Amino acid sequence: MKKIIFAVTLSIFILCSNSTAKDNNNNLKKNKEKAIATAMEITSLRSTLARESVLNNTKITGKTFKAVCGKVGKRVKAISKEEGFKIRHAAIKNRNPANAATTGEVNLIQKISNNKKTQPIEDIVTIEDKRYHRITAPIFVERACLACHGDKDTRPDFIKKKYPEDKAYGFKEGDLRGIISISFPIALPMEESPNP
Ligand code: HEC
């Protein structure tokens, strides 16, 4: 009898842990797809807005910026909240000091640029002691971006004033401008015991 109970308990345990592993796999797949879709949505939103407001507008002001990157920033905030994603823009030649690439990000940017990679890269990172799955996608420069990321001297005045440490100029169409990364927490397959 004891043997039967043991066998049944063991089977239930195996079945349950299997389904947890399956759930985790499904969740990972869903999160990855969502993260890649988010990177594409944000990048194409910026490019559509830039095309709409820059190519029709001769004078580029702080208002144009709000209509392009301001809207992108709002969408980034909304998705981060909805999905629990950490979304980050980074560049070696950055404009906002908060977007200066970290050592890890510099490596990713170089990897993308050396291999002319356009597909997202996946890796695992630890942020504030928590492990995350990270999806990183490249952002390329288009003609509409040059109004603000082209020649150093022709940058709009509001940019020269607001970003004295600006490095995000001198780009050409097709150049790698930087990266967007989307990170989501890794689901552990099982609870970890606090003591070995
Ligand atoms: C109207 C001016 C303007 C246009 C057009 C514009 N940008 Fe920007 N961009 C800025 C400013 C200003 C910032 C800094 C925003 C901040 O303070 O976070 C910025 C920041 C960025 C960043 C974040 C990294 C960093 O350097 O801080 C990326 C990536 C970027 N732009 C890419 C693009 C791309 C790609 C295009 C074209 C599709 C584009 N931008 C068009 C003004 C512009």
Image (cartoon, grey):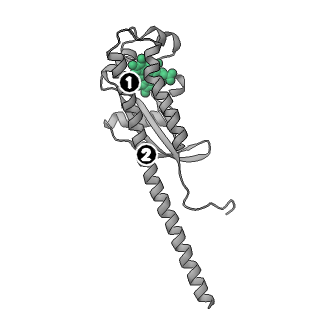
Q: Is residue 172 visible?
A: no
Q: Is residue 61 above or below residue 192?
A: above
Q: Position of residue 47 (x, y in %)?
A: 36, 27
Q: Position of residue 66 (x, y in %)?
A: 47, 19
Give 187 or 58, whichever is nearer the viewer.
Answer: 58
Query: Mark 2: is the Cβ under 8 angstroms from ligand 1?
Result: no
Q: Secondary structure at mark 1?
A: helix
Determine which quarter of the picture holds residue 93.
top left
Give how far apart the Cα atoms at labels 2 and 1 are.
Answer: 22 Å
Give the residue at x 35% y 17%.
54
Q: Position of residue 98 (x, y in %)?
A: 54, 26
Q: Secondary structure at mark 2?
A: helix
Question: Do the CB atoms of the residues marked 2 and 1 lie less than 8 Å apart?
Answer: no
Instruction: Using the image, tell me which numbered label, if any, was put on residue 34.
Output: 2
Q: Position of residue 117 (x, y in %)?
A: 33, 38
* Relative to 126, 110 lies left or right: left
Kind of residue sitting beneath label 1: Leu
Q: Is residue 43 visible?
A: yes
Give the residue at x 34% y 41%.
119
* Relative to 196, 125 lies left or right: left
Query: Mark 1: is the Cβ under 8 angstroms from ligand 1?
Result: yes
Earlier residue among tags 2 and 1: 2
Give the residue at x 54% y 43%.
84
Name the residue carrying label 1.
49
Kind of residue sitting beneath label 2: Lys
Instruction: Using the image, tell me which numbered label, if any, was put on residue 12.
Output: none
Instruction: Give the number of marks.
Output: 2
* Residue at the far right in the pictured view: 195
Q: Residues within 10 Å of mark 1 (few under 14, many from 20)?
A: some
Give the residue at x 43% y 53%.
29
